[in-house]
Every structure is written in structure tokens, then in C-alpha cells.
Image (spheres, rainbow, N blue to C red):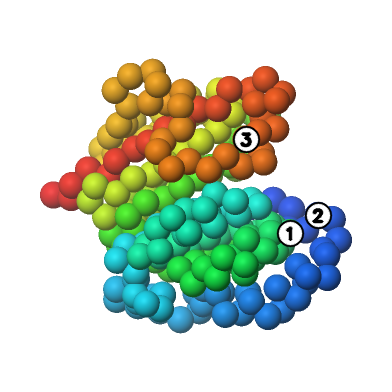
């Protein structure tokens, strides 16, 4: 059995929105190749060696949107390496616009399907995975397209080191309940919440995105869930 199965479905929707500004186009041409993750080559035995200087630990953000959160996290933890996945080219350009003035060197970007990165990463190589405001796929017939499924929960369990965390934020109550149900039935994860504030308020170091601000303006209440990878064996 292949220990690194490639997920059979894509995790992103549309790939391009409004026309890019000239500066964003220039960043895609000049900066992205320097930061792009090459999943056509084997991952290094120590994932932190993707970065220069080598990172102490590596975190992954799936679907980073406009990149506000990812860039802020990288700026606040320069000894940590960050991998961001985003299929939407405008989001990649926006992240690069954060990276360039800050001179961030501890970010690697995959402009494409997160499934490709999940299949490429070595076992127990990540300290944290962030999934923030993913598409909730609100219609019942589309629930099968949600990122959180039993098979992806198993993949996250494979990739996270013992004690590593999966962090999830959404403004859709049903997706929060869906995620809690799927993670709680996994023997590999435990929910870290001890009181209501632990899911009603963001965790320390949270950076509010434009999407979250919009959700709050429209009256939707965010939910923040943190799950910890149980020790193996």
C-alpha cells in the first residue's frame, strides 16, 4: 500500500479573479520562482532544510487567501518555516506583495492544489496546519467537496508530528460542527478546548483577515477550533 497516497480531489475552486496590477504581475514573474515549492522533487529528509537558514520547525497553511495571516505569522516567527498553498493566483500575488517589503525568506509557496503538497510531505514533518475560512460548500450536495473529510483527517494525522496542531477557523456554524465531528471521531486527535472562550475567541497571535472582518460585519460569528495530534504508539 502506498504510504503517501495522492488525494483524488482538488481542494480549490476558481483560479483567477480580477485583472492583476502590473506590480503583482512582476512579483509573480520575479519573486514567486524564488519561493515556489518544487513538489516534482523528493522532499528533503529534514523539511526545515527547504529554508535558508534551515527552519527549526515547519507549518503549513492551506488556502491562504490574501496572505495576511501567513505573512504575519512568518514575520513573527523568523526561525520557523512556513509553506502556503493557494490555487487562486490573485491570492498568491497578494501574499507576494506582503513578502517583498518585509523581506521574508521563511515562506515557500505552492500555487496549486493543496492535495499535491499533502501527498509530497514526509510523515510527522509538520508542527502545525492552519485551515482558515475554507469554502464551506453550503449546499448539501457539495459537502463532499469540503476539505475536512475522514481521509484528509487521516492525512493530517500522518503529516503532523506528535503534539502538532491542526487549527481551523470558520464563520459557518455547520462547517464548525462538521469539523468537530470528524476530528473528534479520529483516534489521532484531541480537541484542546476547555471552556467556551477557547472556540469563541481566536488563539494567541491571530491575525484578522479581510474575509473575517467581512463575516463579522455581516453578522456571522467566527469559530476557532484547535486539535492536537496524539502521540504515536
Q: Is residue 38 left or right of residue 50?
A: right
Indicate whether 172 appears above or below 137: above
**What is the x, y in percent for residue 38?**
51, 77
**What is the x, y in percent for residue 78?**
40, 64
Q: Quadrant of the N terminus?
A: bottom left
**What is the x, y in percent for residue 41?**
46, 81
**What is the x, y in percent for residue 22?**
83, 70
Q: In which quadrant of the rendered view does residue 188 lie?
A: top left
The reply to whether the C-beta atoms of the residues labelled 1 and 2 are less than 8 Å apart is yes
Which numbered disc, 3 or 2, marks the residue closer to the eye? 3
What SS does tag 1 mark?
helix
Q: Residues within 10 Å of mark 1 (few under 14, many from 20)?
A: many
Look at mark 2 in the image and give the residue it sits on. 17
Look at mark 1 in the image and give the residue it sits on. 90
The alpha-carbon separation of the residues under discs 1 and 2 comes to 7 Å
Q: Is residue 174 left or right of residue 17?
A: left
Look at mark 3 in the image and give the residue it sits on. 212
Q: In which quadrant of the rendered view does residue 103 lie?
A: bottom right
Judged from this view, the residue extending furthest toward the front is 101
Amino acid at each position: 500500500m502506498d504510504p503517501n497516497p495522492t488525494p483524488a480531489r482538488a481542494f480549490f475552486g476558481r483560479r483567477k479573479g480580477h485583472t492583476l496590477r502590473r506590480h503583482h504581475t512582476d512579483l509573480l514573474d520575479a519573486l514567486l520562482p524564488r519561493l515556489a515549492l518544487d513538489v516534482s522533487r523528493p522532499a528533503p529528509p529534514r523539511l526545515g532544510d527547504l529554508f535558508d537558514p534551515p527552519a527549526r520547525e515547519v507549518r503549513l497553511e492551506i488556502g491562504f487567501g490574501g496572505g495576511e495571516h501567513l505573512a504575519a505569522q512568518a514575520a513573527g516567527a523568523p526561525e520557523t518555516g512556513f509553506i502556503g498553498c493557494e490555487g487562486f493566483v490573485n491570492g498568491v500575488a497578494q501574499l507576494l506583495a506582503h513578502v517583498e517589503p518585509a523581506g521574508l525568506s521563511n515562506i515557500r509557496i505552492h500555487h496549486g492544489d493543496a492535495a499535491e503538497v499533502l501527498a509530497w510531505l514526509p510523515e510527522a514533518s509538520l508542527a502545525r496546519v492552519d485551515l482558515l475560512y475554507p469554502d464551506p460548500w453550503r449546499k448539501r450536495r457539495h459537502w463532499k467537496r469540503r476539505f475536512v473529510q475522514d481521509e484528509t483527517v487521516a492525512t493530517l494525522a500522518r503529516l503532523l508530528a506528535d503534539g502538532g496542531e491542526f487549527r481551523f477557523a470558520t464563520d459557518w456554524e455547520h462547517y464548525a460542527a462538521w469539523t468537530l465531528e470528524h476530528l473528534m471521531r479520529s483516534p489521532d486527535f484531541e480537541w484542546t478546548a476547555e471552556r467556551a472562550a477557547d472556540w469563541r475567541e481566536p488563539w494567541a497571535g491571530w491575525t484578522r483577515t479581510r474575509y473575517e472582518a467581512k463575516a463579522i460585519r455581516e453578522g456571522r460569528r467566527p469559530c476557532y477550533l484547535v486539535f492536537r495530534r496524539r502521540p504515536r504508539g
